[in-house]
Image (tube, helix red, strand yellow):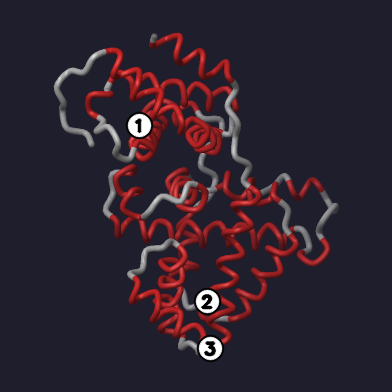
Amino acid sequence: MMEDKSPISREKKIEIFENELLPHIEALKTFAFYLTYDEEEANDLVQDTYLKAFRFIEKYDKGTNAKAWLFKILKNAYINEYRKKSKQPDKVDFEEVINYHESDDLAQNKYYDLEEQIVENMMGDEIVRALNSLPSEFKTVILLADIENFSYKEMAVILDIPVGTVRSRLFRARNMLKELLKKYAFSLGYKDYRGQNKEEEEEL
Amino acid sequence: MIEKNNALNFINKVHAYLDNALSENESSQFIKTIHSDPALLAILNRERNMRTFMKNNLERKTVQNKLIESIKGQLY
């Protein structure tokens, strides 16, 4: 995908750009938005991604995985240029949460019963808020896997990490998300928290 | 009932199954295993429900034409 190619004509570049790269713009916008939580920054990030993709289009093999290639460019642009000025600093001491996963609690039905009820009673804004609270490395794998349906191998390419690391990071990320949702539900009284105490809701 | 020391391995399998990361044989074996124990099937269903909930509630963003035109305008 990334090896140097011989020069191609401008017309050919535009054809590849229009037919293979631009169709992924909504997926890129969604990814960019959940990384930045800012509509304007997301648009800027998408625009920068496409400008870079066009500049390096010789490195793209026509007919291969354009979506993964674009996501890799966007992820690198976000890390190198946007994360420093992001309005959403990483908020969670994730080691504390990861410890949950590494304990035996997964074998306890109580946790899963609880989780099922939480999911049944949740609304969409709570999952968005919890996702937003994850460190970006963990948020990223959830977005790539669960929203964009990338395979472990594709994520490994996009993130420049081994497949095993993708798997373990994703595992941890999902548990962190559940833990946040569980804490959030408890903080609001769990059974009948909807509509209660907006001040507590802001604390997540 | 699944033993505690096998729980993490089982949950790993659940994730791999839902992520389409198991081979055909592994998937068949996994399905047989979970159907042998309703508690295991319940875990799979809860994990699947969680993902469905996320997918349904994380809004996909739309792109306005002016963004596309702005990109194209800078390129050609």
Q: Secondary structure at mark 3?
A: loop
Q: Which residue was labeled with disc 3?
A: B37
The x and y percentages for residue A125 are 70, 47
User: Mark 2 or mark 1, which is nearer the start of the sequence?
Assistant: 1
Give amino acid for label 1.
Ile
- Which chain contains the residue that carries disc 2? A
Disc assigned to residue B68: none
Disc assigned to residue A73: 1
Nearest the viewer among A28 and A36 is A28
Q: Secondary structure at mark 2?
A: helix
The quadrant holding residue A166 is bottom left
The quadrant holding residue A20 is top left
How many numbered circles are shown?
Answer: 3
Q: Secondary structure at mark 1?
A: helix
Which residue: 45% across, 58% down?
Answer: A95
Dividing the image into 4 quarters, which one contains the C terminus of chain B?
A: top left
- Which chain contains the residue that carries disc 1? A
The quadrant holding residue A58 is top left
Of the two numbered discs 1 and 2 in the rendering, the one whose residue sits closer to the viewer: 1
Which residue: 53% across, 82% down?
Answer: B40
Q: Is residue A93 left or right of residue A68?
A: right
Q: Which residue was labeled with disc 2?
A: A105
Q: CA distance from mark 1 to mark 2?
A: 38 Å
Q: Is residue A192 above or below residue A84?
A: below
Give amino acid for label 2.
Asp
Which residue: 36% across, 29% down?
Answer: A80
- Which chain contains the residue that carries disc 3? B
- Within-10-Å neighbours for mark 1: few <14, some 14–19, many 20+: many
